[in-house]
Image: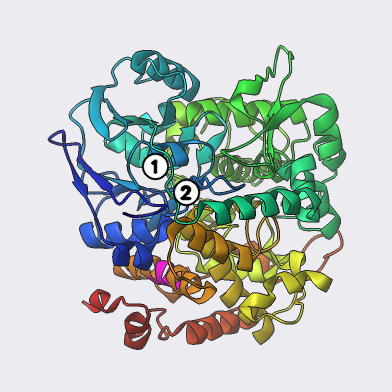
Amino acid sequence: MPFGYVGKILHVNLTDSTWSVEEPNQEWYRTYMGGTGVAAYYLLKHLKGGVDPLSPENVLVFALSPVTGAPLSGFNRFTVSAKSPLTHCFGEAEAGGYFGPELKSAGFDAIVLFGKAEKPTYLYIKDGHVELRDAAKVWGLDNNETLKKIAEETGEKRVRVASIGPAGEKLVRFANVCNDMEHFNGRTGMGAVMGSKNLKAIAVRGSRPLEVAEPEKLKEIVQWQRAFVRQNPAAVAMSTTGTPGVAKHLQASGILPTRNFSDGVFEGIDKIKWDTYEEEIFKSKGTCSMCLVACKRRVISDDEKYPLDAKFGGPEYEAIACLGSQIGNDNLKALARGNQLCNLLGLDVITVGNTTAFVMECFENGILTAADTGGREIRWGDEDGMLWLIEQIASRTGFGDVLADGVKVSAERIGKGAEAYAFTIKGNDLPMHDGRGKTGLAMAMALSATGADHVETPHDPMFQGEGYKFLAPLGLLKPVRPLEMNGDKVRFFFLGQKSFAVNNLLGLCNFASVPVHGMTFEKLVETVIAVTGWNTSLYELLMAAERSLVMARMFNNREGLGPDDDRVIRRWHEPMKSGPLQGHKIDEKEFKEMLKLYYEMSGWDEQGVPRRGKLIELNLEYLLD
């Protein structure tokens, strides 16, 4: 019998309301493992190049891993993947919470969805039993009401629901997938793909216990991790402040994105940093399945204009920066309200913030006027304008309909030079990290298959000084500096990228896993062995991780992407205006040389296509055709 994984993949044809179960062998699981690997396998197998992402021909994958649901901090994440309607390339988004472990408990390692339902539908899975149910009563509802209604209809108080809000139903191309109102598969528009398939939600409930190969060994690892998390500085910091604590550190480094990346310091930081957050709106911590780190934050406020309900989650760092410094807004309650609206309506807060910043800069430069927005002028710091835009975009009302297809498309429609202020990579909006102060992260943004992605690789500043020792098992034996642009930095990224790819492959949270938080590489390997019984190694995990990266790259190659798409935004090649990094920029020529070196290290040709030898090495020779 299999250990860790169930051994069953559910295939659902929404068009004709049928389903079947695939039972891959152990070799298949060890080859693709989970997360990105499993998702890329099915997308490459079932999708032809050039498919419209919002057509029934797109394929949607929910993927776990063999260790999902293990009783450890961070082993709870799952991947949602399809061809992205935002970028038209490989789409992928991860989320934590309780949905992933519950899906495995309900009897499946992954769900592969085809076609389009004739009418609004939700998928209900309970202990291996599969139903496609009428979603008419929840279509049009926000994520919170959807969760409540499905719990009532199924009679399961602890049912776990991955749903879309009105934005997904309206096919907003950066709509997300929500579970339990606190956890989101946020990037690349997976909520729009669900909406295009008339799929409102997937609800799961299970009672199957996780079968592991070495239960006593796993218990030892659980006890070790509990002690490690309680004393590890990075894990303690994440537990104490969550991600909101990051804002003041990026401000001090001069890389807090401000006013559409025009600067790296924000004069209003004191009003939105953690100390103010804790004093004014913080209610309690939230967490994910089995996790002791508890990095989530819940917020409350009885402010009549900006009410906050703890059930709807609290702003993470990305929301604080996107709806704060990035748009020149220092009203903490307003940005927290904006975050909760995004959660309820089903919008990716990163894209919402960047879209708002784009609109504001277009107003500042006379490209947009009130006549374009139906009478509303929106300039830097306009928190109410930001809230108005969220409602407009989610409902595709008025000017919101122009913005609902993403910044890149919006700029093309607006014209008049608007493209100069639309900052995306491969069509994906940038998370709140400025590559001028983290050149390894700049490489991640340029090279990620999903476009701009801040969890593609460990961030450079964490590995200054003694921090580099966390990466010693990868062969990185000396520290790197955040501003370096040389072979050492390329090596750092080349190997560090694989460590984060392991996390995406196995469904692990970066805040509770390798390389710096709640797990070491040695203990991770021991965990995989204890759960699965495989005689595995760090080498096998890294090979599987590289395989997943190459498969995603091959998907993009097939869609016509190449070296010109591996870039950063224009503004990062311009000098910082002020702060500690005033005058600093990424030299375009040096950066291109770094990318060229990465291609060579990776076994890719000059066009960024993996060479025959690399594909054979990774057991992907079938992709040569």
Decide if residue 365 is on the left or right side of residue 149.
right
Depth order, front residue of 71/600: 71
Name the element at disc 2: loop
Depth order, front residue of 105/455: 105
Classify 605 as above or below 84. Answer: below
State the image coordinates of residue 415 (x, y, percent, origin top left).
47, 50
Residue at image coords 42%, 44%: 189
State the image coordinates of residue 194 (x, y, percent, origin top left).
33, 37
Tell me where residue 139 sits by quadrant.
top left
Residue position for label 1: 104
Residue at image coords 76%, 58%: 255
Classify 349 as above or below 251. Answer: above
Examine the structure image and report whether residue 337 is included in the region drawn in magenta. Answer: no
Local crowd size for mark 2, using a 10 Å CA cut-off: few (<14), some (14–19), many (≥20)? many
Q: Which residues are magenta?
A: 546-550
Residue at image coords 35%, 58%: 38
Tell me where residue 434 sits by quadrant.
bottom right
Residue position for label 2: 68
Decide if residue 605 is on the left or right side of residue 522.
left
Local crowd size for mark 1, using a 10 Å CA cut-off: few (<14), some (14–19), many (≥20)? many
Decide if residue 448 is on the left or right side of residue 485.
left
Q: Which of the two discs, 2 and 1, labels the residue nearer the N terminus?
A: 2
State the image coordinates of residue 54 (x, y, percent, origin top left).
29, 44
Classify 6 as above or below 48. Answer: above
What amino acid is at disc 1? Lys
Mark 2 and 1 residues: CB-CB less than 8 Å, in contact? yes
